Image (cartoon, rainbow, N blue to C red):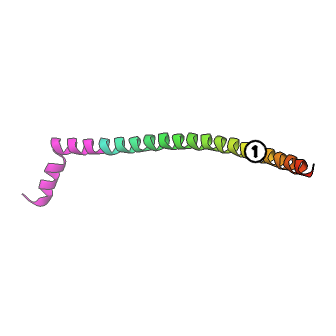
């Protein structure tokens, strides 16, 4: 038996075909699982970034408000020192 007939017999036998089909479905399944996982992770990251952006905006408003309060207190302190 030459090497070509051995390869044909093993590749196209029932077990060979079964192995190829299982491998193809495995690759296909892993590809789908990868893209689903990637989509879920990206959506979660996007939601976290939105949340952080909102928190950052609130913190900046609070800092601005605190700076205004400090400025008012400084001017009141200066006016009290002059009295």
Looking at the image, which residue sits at the far left? 1
Is residue 4 shown above or below 75? below
Residue 31 image point, x, y percent: 38, 45
Read off the magenta span.
1-24
Q: Main secondary structure of the magenta part?
A: helix
Comparing 16 with 79, the one in front is: 79
Residue 64 image point, x, y percent: 76, 46
Residue 10 image point, x, y percent: 14, 49
Residue 21 located left or right of residue 35? left
The quadrant holding residue 58 is top right
Residue 1 image point, x, y percent: 6, 57
Residue at horizontal 21 percent and vertical 41 percent from the top? 18
Residue at horizontal 33 percent and vertical 46 percent from the top? 27
Residue 75 located left or right of residue 6? right
Comparing 18 with 52, the one in front is: 52
Residue at horizontal 84 percent and vertical 46 percent from the top? 72
Residue 72 lies in magenta, yes or no? no
Residue at horizontal 43 percent and vertical 41 percent from the top? 37
Is residue 78 shown above or below 33? below
Q: Which residue is mark 1?
A: 66
The quadrant holding residue 19 is top left
């Amino acid at each position: 038996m030459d090497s070509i007939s051995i390869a044909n017999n093993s590749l196209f036998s029932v077990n060979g075909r079964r192995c190829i089909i299982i491998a193809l479905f495995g690759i296909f399944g892993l590809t789908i699982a990868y893209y689903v996982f990637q989509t879920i992770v990206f959506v979660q990251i996007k939601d976290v970034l939105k949340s952080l952006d909102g928190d950052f905006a609130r913190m900046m408003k609070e800092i601005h408000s605190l700076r205004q309060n400090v400025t008012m207190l400084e001017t009141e302190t200066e006016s009290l020192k002059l009295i």
